[in-house]
Amino acid sequence: MLMFNIRIVIIALALILLLFFYIKNKNFSKVSKLLTVTLCALAVIFAVVYETAIIKQSETDRETLNSFKQGRTLVCDDIEVTAEKFTFVGGTKVFSAKEYFKDIQGVMIPIKNCRVK
């Protein structure tokens, strides 16, 4: 995880330096140059923060799914999710109720709403 973020930062810094040298040779005012570099830096900071949050959520989802596959009970939106009653749909990252349980038929719960009991 950390290595991936370091790569993003290195690439971003390289792009900012290239941008800096590009605008240095053009006839922009100092305010325009400063504004351009500042906006690029903010975009890089946003990208790093966003990517870090996504990686953290993915790790949490993976841990939750592993617990489900190991037979542990999950609590999702006040519903107990077990491998007996639910299946996991990987494409949408939801737990889907099995058809032969009429009381919960059609229930779909996103993994992000779940925690291990």
Image: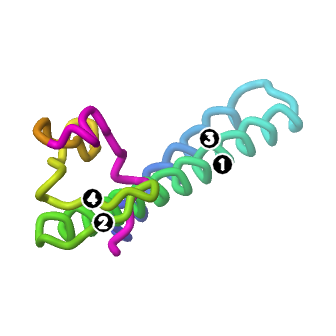
How far is mark 3 from mark 2, CA to CA? 54 Å
Q: Disc 2, disc 1: CB below 8 Å?
A: no
Q: Nearer the viewer, residue 33 or 73?
A: 73
The kind of residue on which mark 1 rests is Ala
Q: Amino acid at mark 4?
A: Val
Residue that appears at 37% across and 64% down: 75
- The percent coordinates of residue 40 (x first, y second) are 65, 41
How far apart, in angstroms, are the residues tagged by discs 4 and 1? 44 Å
Distance, label 4 to label 3, CA atoms, is 56 Å
Q: Earlier in the sequence, mark 4 or mark 1?
A: 1
User: Disc 3 residue type?
Assistant: Phe
Residues 48 and 93: in front is 93
| Lower sequence index among marks 1 and 3 | 3
Q: In the depicted view, which residue is nearer to us: 10 or 73?
A: 73
Q: Earlier in the sequence, mark 2 or mark 4?
A: 2
Q: Residue 37 lies in magenta, yes or no?
A: no
The span shown in magenta is 101-117
Could you classify mark 3 by the number of other residues whose Cα lies within 10 Å: few (under 14), some (14-19), or many (20 or more)?
Answer: few
Is 15 or 79 nearer to us in this picture? 79
